[in-house]
Image (cartoon, coloured by chain):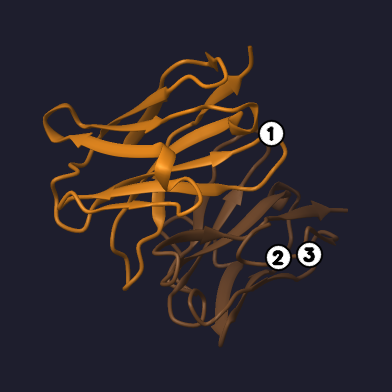
Chain colours: A orange, B brown
Amino acid sequence: QITLKESGPTLVKPTQTLSLTCTFSGFSVSTSGVGVGWIRQPPGKALEWLALIYWDDDKRYSPSLKSRLTITKDTSKNQVVLTMTNMDPLDTATYYCARTTEMAATRPFDYWGHGTLVTVSS
Amino acid sequence: QSVLTQPPSASGTPGQRVTISCSGSSSNIGSNAVNWYQQLPGTAPKLLIYSNNQRPSGVPDRFSGSKSGTSASLAISGLQSEDEADYYCAAWDDNLNGVVFGGGTKLTVL
């Protein structure tokens, strides 16, 4: 059974750094073809992809947020961490982590966590 | 503004067939597969269609996907009340070197 769970602060102040942890089970991020990504969704708005890390430590970032994001993995702990600097109220959103794996020449997000709502406010 | 363009809303009555479009460009849909996600109210997204027209295990065959050129479509036949949800298309973008999502389509079952 594959599960993912996001954890981290629910409230951060503007200019602070956000650190979110995705703890997963049922798969390993060291398995060829596997990756973990972060996607966010502001209240009432669309999904926005943020970052991806693959089994071989290849990392990809949303160009519009690249300067603020860092994604890392700890294979022994089955965790992926996303760090976002200089938080702004516009970053208020539900943050999801999701697994990606190769399926028929594409890499969809096939398993998702429940998400964690992060509010940015002073 | 999302890279992939979807109509903001769609509707149908029970039993009807509805389609949701997703328009992109040569750098995303034109050269990569399209995936579709269903987000029921208050829940996380769920993979509905991958690689343009493949259904993960457990997804009813009422859901189907297609792609032509730089556009893709999701079709839902035999519409049911539990299909009321937000639907998102997504694809890899070679120029942005990352995943792009559509703006989402809210499906209402009348």
Q: Residue at x 32, y 72 (%)?
A: A104
Is B64 drawn above or below residue B108 in the view shown? below
Q: To which chain does the residue with label 1 belong?
A: A
Residue A92 point in image, percent of width and height:
61, 28
Q: Which residue is mark 2?
A: B6
Going by the numbered disc 3, the residue's amino acid type is Gly
| In this picture, residue A28 sits left or right of residue A83 | left
Going by the numbered disc 2, the residue's amino acid type is Gln
In space, the residues marked 2 and 3 are separated at their CA atoms by 23 Å
SS at circle 2: loop
**Quick one: A95 or B68, which is closer to the camera?**
A95
Mark found first going from the N terminus, 2 or 3: 2
Q: Nearer the observer, disc 2 or disc 3?
A: 2
In space, the residues marked 1 and 3 are separated at their CA atoms by 31 Å
Using the rendered image, report if marks 2 and 3 lie on a common chain. yes
Residue B29 point in image, percent of width and height:
52, 76
Q: Is the residue under label 3 in contact with that under label 2 (CB below 8 Å)?
A: no
| In this picture, residue A97 sits left or right of residue A32 | right
Q: Which residue is mark 3?
A: B15
Q: Which residue is mark 1?
A: A43
- The picture quadrant where one finds residue A41 is top right
Q: Residue at x 56, y 73 (%)?
A: B65
Seen as rendered, the residue at the extreme bottom is B69
Residue A4 point in image, percent of width and height:
35, 33
Residue A112 in view: no
SS at circle 3: loop
